[in-house]
Amino acid sequence: MKVEKLHIDDHEEQVKDVVMLAARILLEAGAEGTRTEETMNYIASHYGFVKNNSFVTNTVINFILHDQSYPRIYRIRERNTNLIKISKVNSVSRKLVRDELTLEEAFELLEQIYIKTKDHPIWFKTIAGAMIALSFLYLQDGLKIDIFTTLLAGGLGICVTELVKKQLTTQFIPEFFGGLTIALIVVTGHNYIPGGDLSTLLISSVMPIVPGVLITNAIQDLFGGHMMMFTTKSSEALVTSFAIGAGVSSVLIFA
Amino acid sequence: MMDWILNLVFSFTASYFFAVVFDAPKKLFLPAGIVGAVGWMMGQTFGIMFDLPLVMVNFIGAFTLGIMSHIMARVHKEPSTIFLIPGIIPFVPGGLAYDATSSIILSDYFGAVNIIMEVIISAGSIAVGILFAEQFALLFIKNRRLFFMKKR
């Protein structure tokens, strides 16, 4: 979680520091590979290093400023989705290229973004999850009798997933527990309020924890020609959706 | 008539609250919701008017969504992904994927393969829609501004 210090009195190293930090924030916030590489090249070529090269995947950043300099590698250990950070880094890089910021100020700003930007609180996400589940109940032609169960399951599902995600950095477990919670609530609710449609109920309550960002970014990277990022992102998406499926079906087997 | 209004409202809320879940900036919740609603409604309208199959509905919806998100990205000066991600999720064939999984659990593998093929094709149609929208947007949006915006 610690950010390295900016180099003093060494222009090239300072450029590298800023570029690496920007890329790191972008990838840890779940941006696409094409966007990350574009931002890195954009900043570096603004300072006259036209021959810079970068290669990022989900888990690693490689960057070289020019042929005679040392390359930088950074290994990315934890990732989650945070669109605020992407948007803020985007605006910093725009300002940097328009010469409205010096390298020191840009590094300071990026550091602030990295440390201080917070996710939305969990209660807010719980409400959002409940509303998403309700919307999908309508869009998937659900029945009115299921409204209460979907609200509860959708809200608590995302609440559990986020809470477990805060404690662990593993891939599979948070979505598994989310799916488990949702299926438990849905099956219980379906027993106490009969007459609904079980599959529609499950689909709409599971929707809030579907890995939408991963899927969309994987597709965009595929068409951007970034095959490595597509492979890694889609395998991550596959693991996540398999976790949801496993969680849901381990309840459904007994129901 | 009531169906149309409810469709509009719920596709809007779905995209709006997905923006919340994915930690979008607060001022972009509303544009993201609008983009999602417009994409979904275009898909539905064309689907019902011309009685199109699911693949075409997904394609038209994703195409509109891509165009809208590029326009919004230029208007708000933000990355287009922020608008695209919340909007795309209503199109994701979650229902079909669920059917496939449940038929695997019930050991009905032939049925599962059929449904999985359908899932792959409808996901592919969304992807192609986004691709077309992106290239289409590149044709008309030059130098990072729209044609009606003033020169700096």
Image (cartoon, coloured by chain):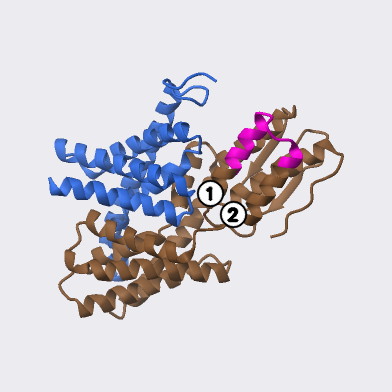
Chain colours: A brown, B blue
Kindly report the secondary structure that dominates the magenta region of the rendered protein.
Answer: helix
Type of amino acid under label 2? Thr
| Magenta span of residues | A89-105
Where in the figure is residue A62, as x and y percent of width and height?
Answer: 70, 45
Quadrant of res B141: top left
SS under mark 1: helix
Q: Which residue is mark 2?
A: A117
Are the residues flagged by discs 1 and 2 in contact, CB closer than 8 Å? yes
Would you call the spot at circle 1 few (<14 residues within 10 Å), some (14-19), or many (20 or more)? many
The structure residue drawn at horizontal position 24% and vertical position 63%, both measured from the top left corner, is A200
Q: Which residue is mark 1?
A: A84
Chain under callout 2: A
Quadrant of res B137: top left
Relative to the observer, which residue lies in front, B96 or A161? A161
Q: Is residue A119 left or right of residue A193?
A: right
Check residue A131 for magenta coloring. no
Chain under callout 1: A
